[in-house]
Image (cartoon, grey):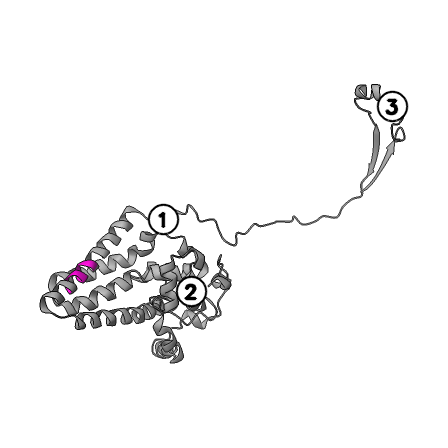
């Protein structure tokens, strides 16, 4: 399209206007005429621009918020765990047993980390949302791999209620059936670590500057799974660092290739391939708000 502009009067600066008359000078009208010529344009395909959110807004997402049902299950889980802990302390005091319950508690802490890794490996690699009993958690963990940072947006009870329900139904019968302080030393610590493992997991995705100083200190001491260690789990090929309590078992399990051996056994016996053998697609590319330098 060619455009030409022609002025009816030439444009010149206005000069020699007395100062006393300048206030009455309001405007100068300039008339322009324009002629346009258009050339036929070829047919162009419609350009479609699709706006894609790298990090979808989830501030008010109801799926990340706690409900009263979630809170009640967490309260029930905590009650059964602390009842078990109280039985261990009171029973140890009455029977003058201190070392055995403490050692049992330590064993519960160590085995809870191992248990979290085995369970995490299983639901990361096998089954889907239709799997009985654990289908919901499998779907949730697959979604977590697509958007790992959303776990930091989940409210406390929303994040813990599923495990709290399991702990309630498991620990309550033990509370009613046993009074042995050693048994309860193990059960209370194991159950506590399993129920709160999702909170430890969320902290492992947190930004250091936003985490409570005590949590950062426990991560740095290796008592809770660290941010740097768990970040390796969210990098291809997504087949390591499954433990999410302390992470102490991760190096042992990864270097001895325990999970790889189990995958081979399941494949040759049942013909089932784990998800970690498949090339990760774009859905498993981590979309994160946290840079690795903050870990």
Sequence-wise, the earlier of marks 2 and 1 is 1
Query: How far apart are labels 3 and 2 at the CA level?
Result: 75 Å
| Region of the chain picked out in magenta, as a range | 82-88
Q: Which residue is mark 2?
A: 227
Q: Nearer the viewer, mark 2 or mark 1?
A: 2
Tell me which secondary structure the magenta stretch mostly adopts: helix
Task: State yes or no: discs 2 and 1 in contact (Cβ < 8 Å).
Answer: no
Residue 31 place in picture, x, y as percent? 83, 27
**Residue position marked by numbered label 3 in the rendering:** 17
Q: Are marks 3 and 1 in contact (CB under 8 Å)?
A: no
Find the residue positioned furthest to the front. 19
Q: Residue 83 colored magenta?
A: yes
Query: Dot 2 surroundings within 10 Å: few (below 14), some, or many (20 or more)?
Result: many
The residue tagged 1 is: 65
Which percent across, then down, holds residue 206?
42, 58
Residue toward you, 1 or 237:
237
Residue at the spot x=44%, y=73% of the render?
277
């Amino acid at each position: 399209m060619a455009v030409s502009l022609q002025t009816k009067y030439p444009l010149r600066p206005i000069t020699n206007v007395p100062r006393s008359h300048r206030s009455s000078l309001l405007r100068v009208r300039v008339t322009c005429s324009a002629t346009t010529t258009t050339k036929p344009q070829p047919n162009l395909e419609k350009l479609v621009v699709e706006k894609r959110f790298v990090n979808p807004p989830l501030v008010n997402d109801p799926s990340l918020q706690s409900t009263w049902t979630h809170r009640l299950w967490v309260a029930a889980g905590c009650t059964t765990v602390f009842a078990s802990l109280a039985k261990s302390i009171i029973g140890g005091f009455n029977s003058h047993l201190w070392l055995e319950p403490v050692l049992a508690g330590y064993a519960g802490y160590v085995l809870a980390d191992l248990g979290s890794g085995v369970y995490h490996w299983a639901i990361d690699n096998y089954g889907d949302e239709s799997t009985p009993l654990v289908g919901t958690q499998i779907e949730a963990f697959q979604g977590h791999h697509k958007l790992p940072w959303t776990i930091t947006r989940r409210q406390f009870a929303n994040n813990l209620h599923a495990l709290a329900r399991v702990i309630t139904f498991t620990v309550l019968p033990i509370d009613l059936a046993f009074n042995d302080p050693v048994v309860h030393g193990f059960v209370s610590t194991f159950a506590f670590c399993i129920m709160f493992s999702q909170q430890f997991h969320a902290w492992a995705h947190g930004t250091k500057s936003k985490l409570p100083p005590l949590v950062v200190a426990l991560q740095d001491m290796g008592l809770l799974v660290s941010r740097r260690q768990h970040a390796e789990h969210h990098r291809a090929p997504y087949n390591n660092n499954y433990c999410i309590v302390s992470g102490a078992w991760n190096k042992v399990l990864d270097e001895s290739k325990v999970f790889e051996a189990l995958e081979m056994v399941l494949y040759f016996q049942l013909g089932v391939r784990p998800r970690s053998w498949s090339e990760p697609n774009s859905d498993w590319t981590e979309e994160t708000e946290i840079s690795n330098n903050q870990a």
